[in-house]
Amino acid sequence: MQLYSTNRQSPPVSLEEALFRGLPPDQGLYLPDTLPVLPESFFRDMHLLPFREIAVRVAVALLGEAVPANVLREVVYRAIDFDAPVVPVGETYALELFHGPSMAFKDFGARFMAGLMAHFLQQSRREVHILVATSGDTGGAVAQGFYRAPGIRVTILYPSGKVSDIQEKQLTTLGGNVTALEVEGTFDDCQRLVKEAFLDPELNQTYTLSSANSINIARLIPQTFYYFYAYAQVRHLGKPLVFSVPSGNFGNLSAGVIARRMGLPVHRFIAATNRNRVVPHYLITGDYAPEPSVETISNAMDVGSPSNFARLQVLFGNQVDQFRTLLTGASYDDQQTRSAMRHVYQTTGYVMCPHTAVAYLGLRDYLATASQPVTGVFLATAHPAKFGPTVEAAIGAKVPLPERLAALLDQPKQSVPMSNRFDDFKAWLTAGHKS
Ligand SMILES: *Cc1c(COP(=O)(O)O)cnc(C)c1O
């Protein structure tokens, strides 16, 4: 199994190289050259398997040539020590992806990737420096996933004042091998700084830089697992399956599309966004026009230029008509998002984070016009307490803080202020490495 660049201007690489490189030299994104289709027996019997066993089978099918099955099993079992239940919400279902340590779905990608890196580093005794830009939830998941990982240093860049208190605490309180840079700017600035670092010849000569953003294929792969597991949980309902995915960089949705290529019977995906609606706009008009991001209450999706779009383009053969056969776009403003949180809470008692509410809205609108009965599943990507003040204001009720998050709030924040200029960032990186 090899990975090729979506731009096809740089040579295919091994999993190990794609994992540590993150981005190919031609600035495309890596994709596996084969997406094996899983046997029918797997789908028939998967409801009998626990989540982690389903994940192991998918991982072995995809990565078995690059990593021994027993290592994959260990990585999966360590990374996924929490459930991803499908729970009924009114006529629909929520796939809850927030039961991991950072209480957002990004735990899946970060923890699996950390496990794979540790495996390869153990063999080569190298040291790597991971750079990661976060719009909120990535930072917490990566900080937790890589904390104290031997041979790995982590620098997290986040936009100052644009992440929630809890998110900020999740990435600024661990210390150790994890440093948080508080960037004067937007998430797009953070992402640009990281991308420039990867393209800087001088930095790359001196250090092994690596990414943990959703551009890294190792983050994407474990995100396929829960689509399979969700299917295992709702298959008995016997209706076509529709997933609504709250999207920012479109890693989560790309993983769903890959799962479908591996044989998962998905009828349709809803690409649900907040006002950063480049992709829904593309699906309607055929015109792809990245824009500066705008701030919303679903801030982990405030992305104006989704980094995984290149992957989707390749998966859909660069044809907007191909996109449309499987994807429906939908976009909502903050007012609609708040109303959805309130309405669902009042009618069902279910409390959603703002990102989840965007996915719920996408599904609701799709179901209103669907021509056949379907099983509608919206992805619940973060625990509502991570966005407590926003959710409480919307639903008019308290959201109890889980123990895990409450403990964080008392800890002091440790961050390094940073401008949004690459020269400053580079100088800091270089100085930091020498000390
Ligand atoms: C990151 C994130 C998203 C967006 O996921 P992408 O893979 O970037 O599209 C949605 N919801 C939450 C809570 C997130 O943290």
Image (cartoon, helix red, strand yellow):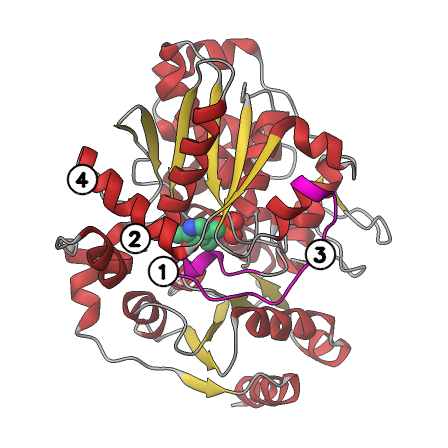
Whether pointer 1 and pointer 3 mark residues with C-beta atoms closer than 8 Å, the reply is no
Residue type at mark 3: give it: Ala
The residue pinned by badge 2 equals 101
Q: Nearer the viewer, mark 2 or mark 3?
A: 3
Q: Which label belongs to residue 289?
A: 3
Image quadrant of residue 1? top right
Residue type at mark 1: give it: Gln
Q: Earlier in the sequence, mark 3 or mark 4?
A: 3
Whether pointer 2 and pointer 3 mark residues with C-beta atoms closer than 8 Å, the reply is no
Q: Residue at x 42, y 16 (%)?
A: 46
Magenta residues span 284-303
Whether pointer 3 and pointer 4 mark residues with C-beta atoms closer than 8 Å, the reply is no
Residue type at mark 2: give it: Pro
Residue 1 visible: no
Task: Give the SS element for disc 4.
Answer: helix
Q: Earlier in the sequence, mark 2 or mark 3?
A: 2
Task: Give the SS element for disc 1.
Answer: helix
* Classed neighbour count for the residue bearing mark 3: other residues with Cα under 10 Å, few (<14), some (14–19), many (≥20): few
Q: CA distance from mark 2 to mark 4?
A: 29 Å
Whether pointer 4 and pointer 1 mark residues with C-beta atoms closer than 8 Å, the reply is no
Whether pointer 1 and pointer 2 mark residues with C-beta atoms closer than 8 Å, the reply is yes
Q: Residue at x 74, y 81 (%)?
A: 202
Q: CA distance from mark 1 to mark 2?
A: 7 Å
Q: CA distance from mark 3 to mark 4?
A: 38 Å
